[in-house]
Image (cartoon, rainbow, N blue to C red):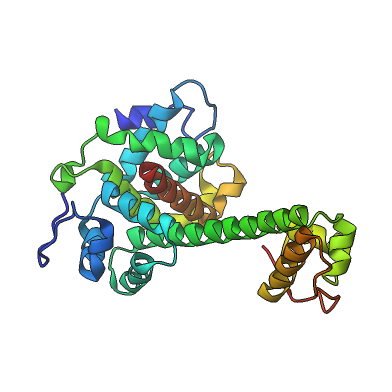
Amino acid sequence: MLRFRNLTITPDDPVEHWGFEGLLAATERGEISDWSRIVATIRNDPWGEVAQTLAEVFEVAEDVGVVAVLRRALDRARTEMAAAERRQVAESIQLLVARSGLTRASFAERIGTSRSRLSTYTSGKVTPSAALLVRMQRLADSSGRGDDGDARPGRADESSHGR
Amino acid sequence: MLGALESEPDWVTNQATPGKIIVGELGEIKAFLIVRRSQVRDYLDVAALSDRYGIDYAAQVLLRIDAYYTDQTKDGSPVSSQLVRQLGAVRPTDESSVTHLGTYKGLDHSWADWSRVTQVCGQVAAWMVERDSD
């Protein structure tokens, strides 16, 4: 059973309190139940403090097997979270289009892009830039109020492709 | 007894003819052999069985291994944990056998690529830890 020899906390404390020493001890002397708790924590926040500290542990831990497993779990957690964030952006854009009351073709035209390009945004295939999102937000706000708004066509290539 | 079991045609390193021995039991025995003797053929069998019956299923089966086996070399520590350590970084005791995979009888040629074995083993280890965190 895992023990933290040099710490005042115990493995029963939340993983968020383990710090570098605790995470290193768990990696090298822990068991599957300890690694699972680490994985659950980094899945919840793949770029959080535990994830950052764990990356430091990877550099010094001698148990290459557990390091490989945890590294894979961290990569997977980050990939899944990024995909979820892209889906969230896509859903937000769908809501903005709906809130505007405009047809997709009109909405696309009013943000300076094509209908097919807008479809890549609403499907999550492509994630638009933050600047373009602001433009969509402004259009949804103004159209939703029934006024004309100040959205004008412009460059619509400010986007990044999802994976 | 292990020698007798390994002469069974169901061992992937001999001939893959599933159904005679319960697959889960087969996997657990082979996984225990990874912990006990850690030979190339042990990793090969666990990788091939996991690939054939699903990584997720294999991980579920191997998470139950502590109910049946104790790691006598590690003062009673869980076999599952030691298994994760070894599957995460495959280091067989007979490493030279890796270059002779083509000489194994009845081995599907796709398993002659050792990197495929280590990749599948790593996936099983990762699933064991992730499954346990659900």
Is residue B121 visible to the viewer in this orientation of the structure?
yes
User: In the image, is residue A124 above or below residue B7?
Assistant: below
Residue A137 in picture, x, y percent from top left: 70, 66
Residue B94 at least partly seen: no
Q: How many discs mark residues in the rendered view?
A: 0
Location of residue A150 (image quadrant):
bottom right
- State the residue in front, A133 or B62: A133
**Where is residue A15, by image quadrant?**
bottom left
Residue occupying the point 31% across, 70% down: A57
- Quadrant position of the C terminus of chain B in the picture: top left
Q: Residue placed at 23% from the left, 63% from the top?
A: A18
Looking at the picture, how far across and down is residue A46, in whole percent? 44, 62
A79 above or below B127?
Answer: below
Where, quadrant-wise, is the N terminus of chain B in this rendering? top left
Q: With respect to residue A132, does B23 lie above or below? A: above
Spot the residue most to the top.
B20
Q: How far across and how far down the image is residue B104, in percent?
A: 51, 44
Measured along the vertical axis of the image, is residue B120 above or below residue A131? above
Q: Relative to residue A154, is residue B10 drawn left or right?
A: left
Left or right: A37, with A137 as reference point: left
Is residue A80 rendered to the left or right of residue A53?
right
Q: Compare residues B13 and B23 and report the one nearer the observer.
A: B23
Nearest the eye: B20 or A9: A9
> Where does residue B9 sit, x and y in percent of width and height?
49, 27
